[in-house]
Image: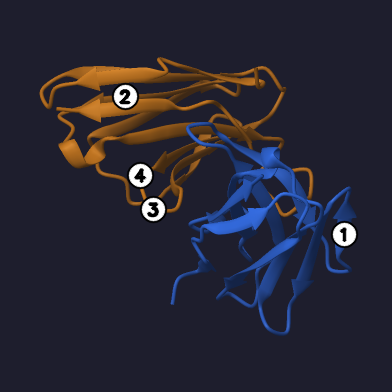
Amino acid sequence: ETGVTQTPRHLVMGMTNKKSLKCEQHLGHNAMYWYKQSAKKPLELMFVYNFKEQTENNSVPSRFSPECPNSSHLFLHLHTLQPEDSALYLCASSHGTGVSGANVLTFGAGSRLTVL
Amino acid sequence: RKEVEQDPGPFNVPEGATVAFNCTYSNSASQSFFWYRQDCRKEPKLLMSVYSSGNEDGRFTAQLNRASQYISLLIRDSKLSDSATYLCVVRGAAGNKLTFGGGTRVLVKP
């Protein structure tokens, strides 16, 4: 078990549903991330939060809405998704976001999303 | 040109053999470099950071060539458990953006 916990591990939803992915880190990190991993494609950065403030939104469609109530919790709210949004959504955390060697990412196990 | 590029493989490696593969990056101002390992249907996990002088961790050796803008990973005495996808990760000049390569798949066979 990593220090980053994601729930649910699997989610199937219709295009009109609203659901949320949850991420919690127990590592005392200050930065949290959402990544999308689709088949045959590199990990794509979606959002970065540092000290619960959003510092990066990588041109993500508004049907994905992140929320970071504190440095330990991160949510990804999903609504009116498309089938092409089906992917593995990975949460990660790090001490900070600068160039320090300490700022490596620790990933959660991911939430595998299928949109019908 | 992709920011971070890897040969997707697979590299089919006999158990006990040595395998090496590279990762090229396009931004000459990139600051730091990492290798992550991802097992099938699992999350990526940090394998090792890559230092300018090169570094070794057991059977794994990582090298950085800034002039030619690539990093490499060498695995000696391959084990069956080394079968995985190896992800190259580059931190950009701005510091807060990590870019992942598509991964190199390694299959170690008996």
Foreground: disc 2 or disc 4: 4
The reply to whether callout 3 and callout 4 are in contact (CB within 8 Å) is yes
Mark 1, chain letter?
A: B
User: Which residue is tagged 2?
Assistant: A77
Q: Residues within 10 Å of mark 4 (few under 14, many from 20)?
A: some
Separation of residues labelled 1 and 2 (CA atoms): 41 Å
Mark sitting on residue B92 = none
Q: Residue furthest left?
A: A16
Residue at 56% x, 27% y is A108
Secondary structure at badge 2 equals strand
Mark 1, secondary structure of its residue: strand
- Hey, what amino acid is under mark 2? His
Chain B rendering hue: blue
Q: Is residue A17 left or right of residue B28?
A: left
Looking at the image, is A65 positioned above or below residue A60?
above
Q: Position of residue A38 (x, y in %)?
A: 35, 44
Residue hosting label 4: A38
The residue at which mark 1 appears reads as B55
The N terminus of chain B is located in which quarter?
A: bottom left
Residue B17 image point, x, y percent: 76, 57
Name the N-terminal-most of marks 2 and 4: 4
* Circles 3 and 2 on the same chain: yes
Q: Is residue B18 visible?
A: yes
Please provide percent x and percent y for residue A1.
Answer: 65, 17
CA–CA distance in space, label 2 to label 4:
18 Å
What residue did someone put label 3 on? A41
CA–CA distance between discs 3 and 4? 6 Å
| Colour displayed for chain A in the image of the structure | orange
- Measured from the top left, where is residue A50 in percent x and y? 59, 37
